[in-house]
Image (cartoon, grey):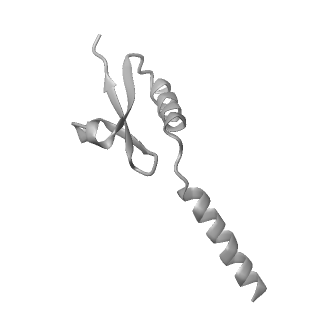
Amino acid sequence: MKRFALAVICCTLATSTLAAPKPCEELKAEIEAKIQAQGVTSYTLEIVTNDEVHDQNMVVGSCEYGTKKIIYQKNDR
């Protein structure tokens, strides 16, 4: 019974840790690193509120409990 209780407590702690939202700047930096690893050099990442999103296809991330989005736009050369 003690093992079961310990397992439940561990799972609960792990779930709450995984569900914790990332700060927007940290998520933006992670996305930026992935884009640069793909060799893309001319792009814009911007953190905006949900109201400012005009094209859902540009959204590459969500932060601050879903109240803000990170949008990506490739700049033409």
Residue in view at x 62 percent, y 70 percent: 12
Quarter of the image where the N terminus is located: bottom right
Q: Where in the figure is residue 74, as x and y percent of width and height?
A: 32, 23
The percent position of residue 13, horizontal first and vertical second, equals 65, 66
Q: Position of residue 3 (x, y in %)?
A: 76, 82
Tell me if residue 22 comes above or below residue 71 in the rendering: below
Q: Is residue 4 above or below residue 35?
A: below
Q: Which image quarter: residue 16?
A: bottom right
Q: Quadrant of the C terminus?
A: top left
Residue extending farthest left: 54
Q: Residue 20: image x %, image y %?
A: 55, 54
In this orientation, which residue lies closer to the viewer: 70 or 73? 70
Total tally of numbered discs in the picture: 0
Which residue is at 50% across, 26% downward?
A: 37
Q: Quadrant of residue 17?
A: bottom right
The residue most toward the right is: 2
Residue at left offset 27%, top offset 15% = 76
Residue 10, relative to residue 3: is it above or below?
above
Q: Is residue 25 left or right of residue 9?
A: left
* Residue displayed at 69% across by 70% down: 10
Residue 64 is left or right of residue 20, and the answer is left
The residue lying furthest to the top in this view is 77
Q: Nearer the viewer, residue 38 or 41?
A: 41
Give above or below for 18 relative to 9.
Answer: above
